[in-house]
Image (cartoon, rainbow, N blue to C red):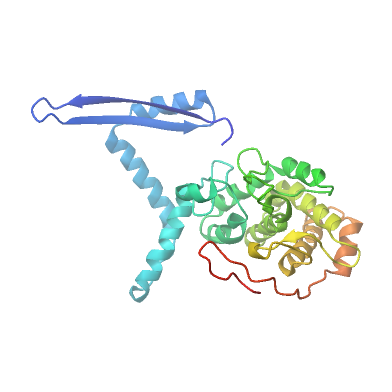
Amino acid sequence: GGGGAVGGAGDSSRDSYSGSSTHRFVSVAARSAAAARSLHAWAAAQSAAQLRERHTTAWAKLWWSGIEFPNNVDDVGRSLNASLYDLLSNIRADVAWSTSPCGIANSPCYNGHIFWDFETWMLPALLLLHPPLAASGLRYRMARVDAAVRKAAALGFKGALFPWESAATGVDCVPDPDKNPEARYEQHISADIALAVRHYYDAHRNVTELRAAWPLVRAVADFWTSRFTDDGHIYQVMTPDESARVVDDSAYTNAAALLAIRWAVRAARVLGEAPRAAWMRRVERGAYIGTAPAPPAQADARGDDGPSS
């Protein structure tokens, strides 16, 4: 992502007896042309056996921290390890980047963009088994707080509103936002990201890393403080159940928003910072968590009735 460079070169030989050909090529990807050239020169000097050995050794280190299953649940083990393989194939500890749902291989569905799925569904698995990979995904968000602040300001709010679909710049990549309101209304993603930082801190208690994430935590709390009404309502949001479309007082969104503000208060105290008075007032007043009428049944692409609650 972001100004990368790709290089490649190869050689070939031809068997004059059988007419078959053997081709060997090396390709690399790096964050700059100079880095790509350097890495390519090194890789081209290695034999196929040497590269394969490095690959096998690197994967052995990753799999050392894994999950073993008794023989009577081999199917479960294979399924879970296949999912873990997808995660390990698509995120690195030495690059501050995240990953799309189901990884790069599923990019036709998600265009390779990064959603709330990483922080909510994917990070917990990495958090315990591969903490450096979880941290890499969080650093990706930390590096794009400024873009999230600009998005919130454009909509008239304080703090940081992260994009529903994110890529290199942190600008929302939702295709055709006029037809896809997720870009404007599916705002729970900001709470999801801040709470992922909380989960990381609770697992590892690293104050230095929390200090680095503090601008993100603070900006998300400011956003939600500006979104709540005095009596604890949040109007005009899209819930995780996108078929419900835009609603007022999504139970998930309101609860996650309040938790994000509570987390900012706690993080401030851990870091020796003063929690904002507006955060303290919201924590004291709470959030409205009520019930909403069921949306009308909707037809999905197959013509079946959609969810009615």
Q: Is residue 40 visible?
A: yes
Please name the residue shown 59% across and 34% down the image. 2
- Left or right position of 95 against 279: left
How far from the left and from the top, in percent, is residue 83?
Answer: 45, 59
Q: In which quarter of the image is the C terminus?
A: bottom right
Q: How many marks?
A: 0
Please name the residue shown 39% across and 31% down the image. 27
- Left or right position of 164 against 51: right
The relative height of residue 231 versus residue 142 in the rendered view (above or below) is below
- Left or right position of 205 against 117: right
Q: Which residue lies furthest to the left in this view?
A: 17
The relative height of residue 102 versus residue 77 in the rendered view (above or below) is above
The relative height of residue 22 versus residue 172 in the rendered view (above or below) is above
Please name the residue shown 29% across and 32% down the image. 47
How far from the left and from the top, in percent, is residue 117?
Answer: 59, 57
- Left or right position of 91 against 59: right
- 273 or 103, which is in the foreground? 103
Q: Can residue 272 be seen in this view?
A: no
How far from the left and from the top, in percent, is residue 283?
Answer: 85, 66
Quarter of the image where one finds residue 80: bottom left
Quarter of the image where one finds residue 49: top left
Q: Quadrant of the N terminus?
A: top right
How far from the left and from the top, in percent, is residue 87?
Answer: 48, 53
